[in-house]
Amino acid sequence: MMTDLYQSQRAMRQMRQQAMQRGVVAILDVGTSKIACLVLRFDGTGRLSEDNSIGSLAGQTGFRVIGAATTRSRGVRFGEITAMQETERAIRTALQAAQKMADIRVDHVIACFSGANPRSYGLDAQVDLDGQEVTEAEIGRVLNACDVPDYGAGREVLHAQPVNFALDNRSGLIDPRGQMGQTLAVDMHMLTVDAVAIQNLVRCVKRCDLELAGIANSAYVSGISALVEDEQELGAACIDMGGGSTGVSIFIKKHMIYADSVRMGGDHVTSDISMGLGISTTIAERIKTFNGGVNATGADDRDMIDIGGETGDWEHDRRTVSRAELIGIMRPRVEEILEEVRLRLDAAGFDHMPSQQIVLTGGGSQIPGLDGLASRILGQRVRLGRPLRVHGLPQSATGPGFSSAVGLALFAAHPQDEWWDFETPVDTSAVRPFRRAVRWFRENW
């Protein structure tokens, strides 16, 4: 079971290398409310220098965005593909528009998706070195010594990243290669998701005549682009509020060590408004965007919003609603989403982390007053995060709704080491208990 996955992930890494050599790749964020596509051109700068002084073993490269497009998503619910043909059509639409802008044809795509019930595991292992220097092979050996938990049928591993190495009693090493010691230990974060979600995405991409060169969890890549370097290093949570699901990821020492998702997002707020006021979801979405909020003041009782006249027939339909009423509909749902997020953070042991910064991002994070409400429900330090600036990104793609697309571009150019980047003799049969990710903070870091 693990062997197939290991092989298919290795095959994807090879595809990625081919795409890098060709110099272009498409980034695809398959969401519930929109599908975003960026076309990247790699300029090949920043290849590993002679002394391996930069970055991960996986190699990194500079890039610029040369095409960008979004289209309304179809056939996706809670971040998972439910109607293959509709999603395939939407992906083709976004891809064609982005290719047209870039004026180039793209064969390789790296995709991310949210939802699919992610589960985090903390694995660890150690091997004897007998005073040898740590080589690539030794890293492969220690990773392979990790006991993979029995994560259940119908699940697949999406990420398996070494997040900490220790050599003898020196912990917190990012890259132990070239150093000497007696024992080498590793902590690995493994993320599993529902297999069907991956299979559907793979099939969709294949049906669009594209090669899949990589796949990632949305909450993870959002964290890469919305958290600043200090936050990734010292510890922070990224809350990515999408349309159909809200992703949660926790970072420390520049690695994701936990991810989860809540099956609710901005679309649920919209549908509450639509049902509460008896209006179409299109109008509900519009008034949510232009008039919405979560904190009512006295002035909001007097602030009236036109909701009638969907047909443009102002003569017969002059309905209005006060902004206070609109907020009264929105707030309970937003609170419910944040309460669910808090449960996820508590389960991860986030309160034991040295730094408890929380960053809200994603299209759903744009509701006015959300950061204040979130800091009341989730804890002290909450800020709103937009994705990092990357070369060539059009103005229209710089908002929080593009955190995962931009993060996926960064992930494509600077991939983190994953278990399958190392030659390992795969025969994982032993299954022993695993530790929760967060025990590592307290014990090792």
Image: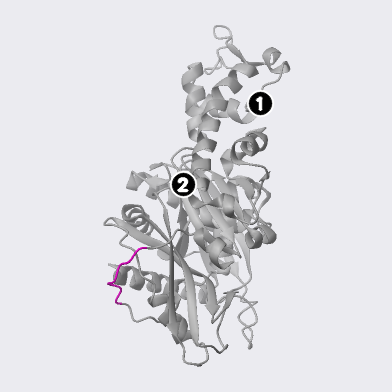
- Is the residue 189 above or below the residue 130 in the image? above
Q: Earlier in the sequence, mark 1 or mark 2?
A: 2
Q: Residue at x 62, y 73 (%)?
A: 43
- State the residue in front, 376 or 423: 376
Mark 1, residues whose alpha carbon is within 10 Å: few (<14), some, or many (≥20)? some
- Is the residue 324 above or below the residue 416 in the image? above
Q: Amino acid at mark 2?
A: Ser
Provide the residue span drawn in magenta.
427-433
**Residue extending furthest top?**
316
Which part of the image, by quadrant, shows the N terminus?
bottom left
Query: Which secondary structure class fits the magenta region best?
Result: loop
> As drawn, is 229 to the left or to the right of 164?
right
The residue carrying mark 1 is 295
Q: Residue at x 48, y 70 (%)?
A: 187
Mark 2, residues whose alpha carbon is within 10 Å: few (<14), some, or many (≥20)? many
Alpha carbon separation for disc pair 1 and 2: 25 Å
User: Which mark is drawn over residue 440?
Assistant: none
Q: Amino acid at mark 1?
A: Asn
> As drawn, is 30 to the left or to the right of 318?
left
Circle 2 SS class: strand
Circle 1 SS class: loop
- Is the residue 280 above or below the residue 136 in the image? above
- Hey, which quadrant is residue 137 in on the image? bottom left
Give the x, y percent position of residue 125.
43, 74
